Image (cartoon, rainbow, N blue to C red):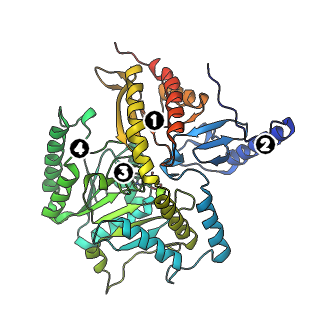
């Protein structure tokens, strides 16, 4: 059995090793005593203490090094500690740490210009937030003010963030405890051929039926009551399901016909993850509002925002936009965004993500599916892939339930770590979401680790 890789980052001398282990123990002790974690039963968790990271790797205090196939929370798109971006953060910190949002700031303007330049024609303004959820919150508010309507539609298989509107837009079970039935949100089923809610047998059938269903929901909810549709271009945490050809164009058409604002949630799928700057670039559509976060700074400093169509931005030329944040366009975050985008452009990082998807991860993951019966489906593009694990290929019974934890997935996660891989696992899936900077050699190394770890999933397979 392979053992977790030892890092060369820890000093082999036992004294230094002991010091590091003590620092790790102290980190964990403070965490358990004082840190209240997201989405967790506090007494049941034992977080991994991360001592450091570089490029595609992270390591703990005990000298275990892991290939980061999670990009943390799918946000370290340029890998860990990129020197150019770290230098830009230091430089900005030396020059000017903060400026209130009502003033103009050079880095804020430059970040907005660079982001607007990446967006489709006719989207020239950016409202900055600190997170993806806030981006969704403000995009929703803009759509409501623009249309004078309240209701928003979103997909059941989705995650949009944890603030009030964003969690109610969210389709997965994390919404339930915060859903008071009064948020003005209705849900619909997006396309997902492997688990088709429409009994479709081909991508084109799934597309056609998903669009007919969406239009039915619009008609039956009352088009005049609906402000817009919020859609992850590729649902991320909900399962990485790239939409079939024609779905986004069809949704754009429905929005046009009924006067609805199309809000693209690109928080996870944007900034290179799919091998394109925006995930919707893969299908050549243009939304009215784009919510972004995560990859815009590679998570080095928190930043999110909304790219706004000129028509919606014009609503607020002569009346005040009723919303703001103390840290909207924080200089340290904006300087990070400028450096991140320029680094991605100069180093061809988006192109690398596309190439890794086509040449390494796509074929490599499909080969794993041939060897491991528990892999029911492989889907994705760029560095944005999901392995759908099943207990039975014929019935497609998921290896783990829709929500909560499961012994099978706990085994899979433990096996990944044992083989030196930090995975992103959720429900019955492994999401393969390494940095956009990952090299072909590292991606191949990760595939080998996955190959070994999937043996643990196969043990829970009950099908023929
Ligand atoms: C698609 C999507 N939208 C919104 C969010 C919320 O972003 P944040 O956690 O920065 O608030 C996330 C976070 O994972 C996300 O994946």
- Circle 1 packing at 10 Å, graded few (<14), some (14-19), many (20+), is few
Quadrant of image for the N terminus: top right
User: Marks 1 and 2, Cα distance to the nearest angstrom?
Assistant: 34 Å
Task: Give whichever of discs 1 and 3 has the lower sequence position.
Answer: 3
Instruction: Write down which quadrant ligand 1 falls in.
Output: bottom left
Q: Position of residue 22 (x, y in %)?
A: 80, 41
Above or below, 182 relative to 41: below
Label 4, label 2: how far apart the Cα atoms are: 49 Å
Is residue 173 found left or right of 196 in the rendered image? Answer: right
- Which residue is nearer to you in this view: 288 or 131? 288
Q: Give SS at disc 3.
A: loop
Say which residue label 4 marks: 244
* Disc number for residue 404: 1
Residue 423 visible in the snapshot:
no
Residue assigned mark 3: 170
Give the label on residue 20, or none.
2
Whichever of callouts 1 and 2 sits on the residue coming sooner in the sequence is 2
Q: Nearer the viewer, mark 1 or mark 4?
A: 4
């Amino acid at each position: 059995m392979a053992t977790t890789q030892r890092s060369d980052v820890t000093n082999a001398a036992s004294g230094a090793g002991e010091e590091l282990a003590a620092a790790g123990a102290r980190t964990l002790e403070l965490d358990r005593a004082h840190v209240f974690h997201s989405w967790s039963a506090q007494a049941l968790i034992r977080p991994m203490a991360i001592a450091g990271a570089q490029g595609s790797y992270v390591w703990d205090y005990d000298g275990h090094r892991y290939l980061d196939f999670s990009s943390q929370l799918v946000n370290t798109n340029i890998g860990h500690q990129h020197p150019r971006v770290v230098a830009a953060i230091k430089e900005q910190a030396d020059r000017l740490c903060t400026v209130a949002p009502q003033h103009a700031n050079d880095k804020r303007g430059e970040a907005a210009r660079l982001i607007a330049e990446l967006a489709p024609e006719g989207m020239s303004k950016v409202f900055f937030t600190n997170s993806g959820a806030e981006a969704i919150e403000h995009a929703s508010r803009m759509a409501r003010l623009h249309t004078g309507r309240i209701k928003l539609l979103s997909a059941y298989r989705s995650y949009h963030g944890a603030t009030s509107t964003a969690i109610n837009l969210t389709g997965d079970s994390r919404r339930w405890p915060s859903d008071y039935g009064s948020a003005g949100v209705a849900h619909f089923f997006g396309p997902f051929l492997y688990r088709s809610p429409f009994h479709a047998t081909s991508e084109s059938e799934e597309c056609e039926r998903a669009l007919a269903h969406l239009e039915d929901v619009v008609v039956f909810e009352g088009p005049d009551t609906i402000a817009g549709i919020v859609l992850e271009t590729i649902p991320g945490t909900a399962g990485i399901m790239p939409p079939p050809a024609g779905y986004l164009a069809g949704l754009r058409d429905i929005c046009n016909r009924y006067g609805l604002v199309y809000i693209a949630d690109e928080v996870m799928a944007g900034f290179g993850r799919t091998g394109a700057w925006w995930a919707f670039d893969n299908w050549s559509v243009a939304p009215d509002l784009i919510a972004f976060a995560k990859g815009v700074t590679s998570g080095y400093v928190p930043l999110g925002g909304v790219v706004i169509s000129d028509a919606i931005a014009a609503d607020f030329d002569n009346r005040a936009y009723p919303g703001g944040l103390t840290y909207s366009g924080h200089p340290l975050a904006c300087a990070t965004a400028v450096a991140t985008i320029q680094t991605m452009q100069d180093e061809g990082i988006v192109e690398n993500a596309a190439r890794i998807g086509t040449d390494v991860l796509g074929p490599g993951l499909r080969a794993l599916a041939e060897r491991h019966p528990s892999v029911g489906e492989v889907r994705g593009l760029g560095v944005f892939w999901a392995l759908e694990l099943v207990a039975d290929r014929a019935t497609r019974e998921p290896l783990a339930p829709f929500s909560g934890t499961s012994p099978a997935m706990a085994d899979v996660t433990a096996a990944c770590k044992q083989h030196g891989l930090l995975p992103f696992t959720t429900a019955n899936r492994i999401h393969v979401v390494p940095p956009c900077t990952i090299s072909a050699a590292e991606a191949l190394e990760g595939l080998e680790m996955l190959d070994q770890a999937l043996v643990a999933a196969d043990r829970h397979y009950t099908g023929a």
